[in-house]
Image (cartoon, rainbow, N blue to C red):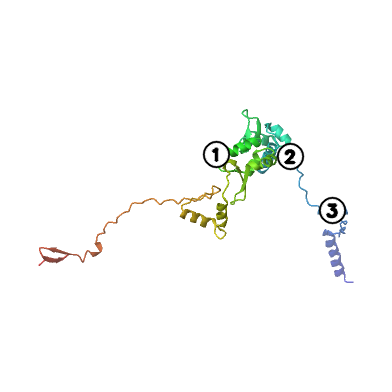
Amino acid sequence: MDPALLREREAFKKRAMATPTVEKKTIKEKAPPPPSRDDSQKKMRPPTAPKLDSSTYKTMSGSSQYRFGVLAKIVKFMRTRHQDGDDHPLSIEEILDETNQLDIGQSVKNWLAGEALSNNPKIDVTPDGTKFCFKPVYKIKDGKSLMRLLKQHDLKGLGGILLEDVQESLPHCEKVLKNRAAEILFIIRPIDKKKILFYNDRTANFAVDDEFQKLWRSATVDAMDDAKIDEYLEKQGIRSMQDHGLKKPVPKRKKAANKKRQFKKPRDNEHLADVLETYEDNTLTQKGANPT
């Protein structure tokens, strides 16, 4: 072998040994273990909202809907209690105990005792301001007081009384009305179909001759409405009874303010300055021309 080639070979080996080299080792990646059943269930579960205790929910401050719900329950209880014949006043603690609302917050309790119940039109407050009772429309307790009220309305011309107001004011109303049925007249108001109670004045009862009854029944008004009947009676000089029920307010029209008329001043004829002519000493002269 050529000695020159051997020398080059040895020199190449020396250079290769002097140059450092780094070998990359291939690391085998391990496959992840299959997910267990517990882990999959944990991932699938949605996040649960924090549980609210009933006591903490009822004492949440700033809930006006909850406050007025408590107030409405108290007013309903006081009305039912009055209709059952219990009219003695109760303190705020007794009312909350009867309505099963002792778990309300202190702020709601202070609002009820100091503001809500005192300003409610259906609740009456004792002079010391510590107890409350129901405030009915009419102060009637039995059949005698009811008949006295109806008689006063009849004598003063105040008309009848709504049945729903009597039911709210009179304890054991159905029993009283049943016993006094012969002394009371029930009329259904055509506007809203509500029942009205009137005093049955027996002294106004009188016998009517059969001839007048026949004349009354022979007058047919089936094809006429109330407006036509009223118009016919007014033409005959008879004034019909007016309905004093619910009436819709008629909006008043505002009168326009009386404005003073301003007369326009005559304008100067500035645009005819070059055309105007003057007459002096029976001579005709134009503006800008000397007279001859």
Circle 2 crowding by C-alpha within 10 Å: few under 14, some 14–19, many from 20: few
Q: Position of residue 126 (x, y in %)?
A: 63, 30
Q: CA distance from mark 2 to mark 1?
A: 58 Å
Q: Are marks 2 and 1 in contact (CB under 8 Å)?
A: no
Secondary element type, mark 3:
helix
Q: Can you identify the residue that label 3 sits on?
A: 41
Residue for point 84% across, 65% down? 12
- Going by the image, does 40 lie left or right of 285? right
Task: Note whether 21 is above or below 76 in the view shown.
Answer: below
Dividing the picture into quarters, in which one does residue 40 lie?
A: bottom right
Q: Earlier in the sequence, mark 2 or mark 3?
A: 3
Depth order, front residue of 67/4 = 67
What's the residue at 68%, 35% (across, down)?
109
The residue singled out by tag 2 in the image is 56
Query: Along the polypeptide, which appears first: circle 2 or circle 1?
Result: 2
Please name whichever residue, 71 or 213, is drawn nearer the observer in this view of the structure.
Answer: 213
